[in-house]
Amino acid sequence: NAGVTQTPKFQVLKTGQSMTLQCAQDMNHEYMSWYRQDPGMGLRLIHYSVGAGITDQGEVPNGYNVSRSTTEDFPLRLLSAAPSQTSVYFCASSYSASGSLHTQYFGPGTRLTVL
Amino acid sequence: QQPVQSPQAVILREGEDAVINCSSSKALYSVHWYRQKHGEAPVFLMILLKGGEQKGHEKISASFNEKKQQSSLYLTASQLSYSGTYFCGTDGGGSQGNLIFGKGTKLSVKP
């Protein structure tokens, strides 16, 4: 099991460029989420999905789009990058079962810099 | 609503104890604790469910008081490997599959 994988690990963009952060999991988890982490802010939820074809907004969704066409994949799209989107992005998956309610399995993260 | 963690940072000598607190203004269904080393992803430590249970992971234990909507993480006889940032994540009982995380507590253990 690879768990949760993310690509790329590092990315530098110019303001206005678009890109897609990839996330995949091989644990057959129904739930997937995207968080961003900024110094002193903790992990803030961007978008989440409760299953293939179903997505919803989290706390900080502006400037990002997601889709979930398969259980395994949950890409995050930056539409027009801004310096305020400089951050570390973590993808996570989870499942719901007694004793393990929504424990987040995190990917290794993508460090994004927008110039 | 983001849970509030305290303290924001703590410095210990090896062998000393520490307590990290997490409180929420909303009713909680479960509390999760994670540790993150610099440059790495958060790693799951333990989950506490409604019922006031206490759990342990090596010399790290935690409690959950659902009436007070609080959880505490206890680090006993700290080791250098305990250094990192600790996050609590709360679940209000919804079925969204994600957590609301606190801002973290940075723990530094010195020799």
Image (spheres, coloured by chain):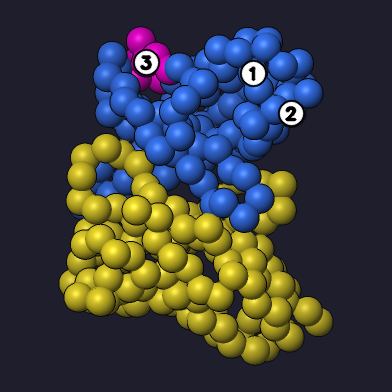
Residue indicated by mark 1: A81
Q: Which chain does yellow denote in the image?
A: B
Reading the chain from its start, which is encountered first: label 1 or label 3? 3
**Judging from the image, what secondary structure is the residue with disc 1 in?**
loop
| Left or right: where A33 falls relative to A108 | left
**Judging from the image, what secondary structure is the residue with disc 3 in?**
loop
| Left or right: where B11 falls relative to A23 | right
Residue indicated by mark 2: A113
Residue A71 in picture, x, y percent from top left: 35, 19
Residue A54 falls in image quadrant: top left
- Find out whether residue A68 is within the magenta segment: yes
Q: Does A55 appear above or below A70?
A: below
Reading the chain from its start, which is encountered first: label 2 or label 3? 3
Residue A68 in picture, x, y percent from top left: 37, 15
Residue A69 falls in image quadrant: top left
Q: Which chain does blue denote in the image?
A: A
User: Disc 2: which chain?
Assistant: A
- Residue type at mark 2 is Thr
Residue indicated by mark 3: A68
Q: Are marks 2 and 3 in contact (CB under 8 Å)?
A: no
Q: Which residues are magenta?
A: A66-72
